[in-house]
Image (cartoon, rainbow, N blue to C red):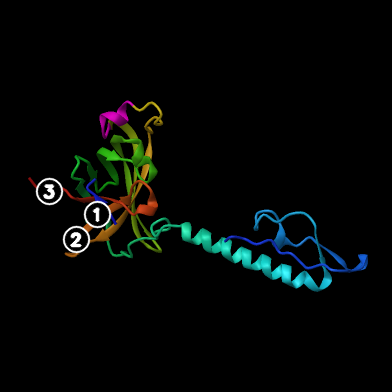
Amino acid sequence: METTGLRAIASPTAELNTFNKSDKVPLHDPLLSVGRCGLQGEVLVAAGSRLRVRWAAVGCVVVVLAVLAACAGPYQYYNGTGVHDATSAEVSGGWENIEGTRVVLREDATALLEKLDGQDFDFDDGWRLSGTGTWQLTDEDGGQVVRLTLTTRTKVESRSPATATDTSSPDPPSTYVWSFYVDRDQHDELKLFFFYGDPDAGNTYEMTRKTQS
């Protein structure tokens, strides 16, 4: 995990030698519908071959499901850190990132943020938002999450000059919601993070306690 401070499917064929019209079995089987191996329409098979076709279709569905499962990256369906013991008082305070990002979570549930990048694929747009908002510590099945909501945007910056001149990028949002996972390091100190870029890559954007000056 990188961290930033910032089948071939064979068509079922039945060997039809000789059969009477009464032996033809029109199969309108859900297993053979469009979207499951591309089979469609009416399939005429000898009565004794129906089971063979059905098993071929079932095997096809199994292959498709296996391919779809293989396409999902390990972080695409991330559930959480398993941390459930953090308190709001412990989470409140100043947080920072090595690239100038600063977030203050006040005890009254208001928040101040500066140069905070977008989450997930929004990170690739290159904007960085500053402003004020609110925050809330929630406890979910997979662990605790801090929901940070930007309600008043005061400034927009770009991570790089190239991104700032890219007219194909969408306009930066005027309001935004981040979901920070709550975790603990080896010293049992809290840290906050979200995934940025392609979620399959598992890149994390970490916030640590603001250094006391």
Q: Nearer the viewer, mark 1 or mark 3?
A: 3
Report x, y in % for residue 164: 31, 28
Residue receiving disc 3: 211
Q: Secondary structure at mark 1?
A: helix
- Residue drawn at the location 52% of the way across and 58% of the way down: 68
Which region of the structure is painted magenta?
A: 158-165
Whether 17 is drawn above or below 175: the answer is: below
Residue receiving disc 2: 189
Q: Secondary structure at mark 2?
A: loop
Report x, y in % for residue 71: 47, 57
> Depth check: 164 or 80 in front?
164
Give the residue type at disc 1: Val
From the viewer's perspective, tell me whether residue 76 is left or right of residue 25.
left
> Depth check: 7 or 34 in front?
7
Residue receiving disc 1: 91
- Residue drawn at the location 67% of the way across and 65% of the way down: 57
Give the residue type at disc 3: Thr
- Residue 75: quadrant of the picture: bottom left
